[in-house]
Amino acid sequence: MSASTPLRTTLIGVVLAATALIPLQGTALAAQTGTTESATTPASSVSGIADTTALALARSLADPAWNNQVRTALLASDSVDLHALTRASTSATGKSLGAKVTTADRGVATAKGLGSDAGSLLRVGLADDAMKDRLAGGAAPLVAAAPSDDDASTFTAYDSRGTAHTLTTDTVPDRPVYLVDIDGSKAVAQGLEIVDAALAEAGLDVPVPAAEVNSFSTLATTGIDTTLINSVQVSDVKEPWFKSDAEIFTLVTGFGTNGTPRVDTVEMPYLNKAATTYYPNQVLVNWSNYKYNMADAVMMEDDGDTNYQALAKAIVTVLLTITDQGVYIPLADAVLDAIPTSWWTDDPDYVDSWYTLAKTTKGTRNGAAGNGWMNVSPYHVSAL
């Protein structure tokens, strides 16, 4: 393992340099000057589709009845399903917008590499809770798409006339801002199903054969050994103030019982706030899936434009080139190296990684990148 340490250290350093995203504090309303993200965002990308939808929603608010319906919904809830909101509308404006939202949802599903049955993916909510009083008082809202670049210093919002306004990151604007964003939890759940299917097809996510299970007394008679996450915290979930909760997932890597590299995906929908300790009691590693008593974990975040088909293809392509040499080899570096450099801007953010987890690992383990920690312990799942 000592031979892999320099490579591991170098790669993590490169990753951290590429993902040194600084959370932005507040926004301010500015004149239409400078370059904003929407001016350079491809219309077919998730960000481009969200921006087009934000403009359409903003213009639709010129209808007083529909405007009031949206206002009432967002005062009652942090965010709402945009498709459901338009379907519930009794106004022609709301129904007309609904057709555009349906098209936009399909475009988002395609851009993210999800299936045609992904359903509604766009949501809308207030950009900051502090805006509720102004919205309730009758202030005219602006509408913006959630910026896809965490380093952006400005982004574009629209009023009901379709006029663009540039929001800066200095202070919260005086006017309420509706933020059009992606349903991250739904996207991650469906996206990881895509990844799991691709891994299984490539033989990188293969269940333990029944005959092999019967040969393991610990499996056949007493259950399975796992590693449990007792508590976890991340110091930076890579999300500025104007974004919704982070959507975190973890890729657990090692060699499967058949000697080929294996990746197991772990959803972590609860882990969405920085500097907050969560107590999930969640299984991280199922050791019956692995040949060696070592595994790695790479924690990542879906940041809007993630295409899960492309992510799966990248991981599969690199892991299929690795063969079992009879000893444990850390595969976390290979997974990180498989992800195209361009994805590190917002697709998906690297959060942290944990190396050499073993069946007996217990206690608090800090991540290699220093962005988080996990308290883990062995946990035996008894057979019924």
Image (tube, grey):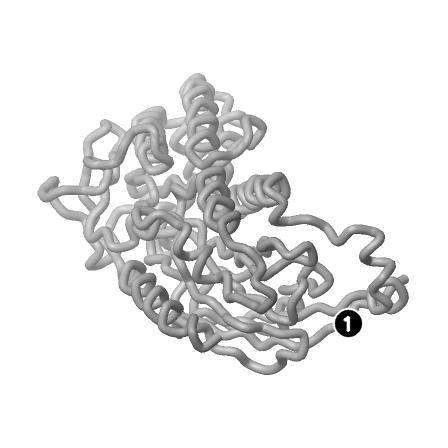
Q: Is residue 144 left or right of residue 233?
A: left
The residue lying toward the viewer, choosing from 42 and 312, is 312
Number of marks in the rendered image = 1
Query: Residue 207 at x, y = what percent?
Result: 72, 50
Query: Residue 327 at x, y = what percent?
Result: 58, 68
* Residue drawn at (85%, 61%) of the image: 215
- Furthest toward the front, the residue is 325
Q: Name the residue under label 1.
A: 380
Q: In this view, does 245 lie to the left or right of 17?
A: right
Above or below, 175 relative to 275: above
Q: Is residue 62 left or right of residue 164?
A: right
What amino acid does circle 1 point to?
His
Above or below, 48 relative to 264: above
Pick the quarter of the image with the C terminus.
bottom right
Instruction: Classify mark 1: helix, strand or loop.
Output: strand
- Residue 137 in sight here: no
Query: Residue 275 at x, y = what percent?
Result: 44, 72
- Furthest toward the left, the residue is 33
Q: Is residue 51 left or right of residue 37?
A: right
The residue lying toward the viewer, choosing from 255 and 243, is 255
* Residue drawn at (27%, 30%) of the image: 160
- Residue 48 in sight here: yes
Q: In which quarter of the image is residue 246?
A: bottom left
Q: How crowded is mark 1: few (under 14 residues within 10 Å), some or many (20 or more)?
A: some
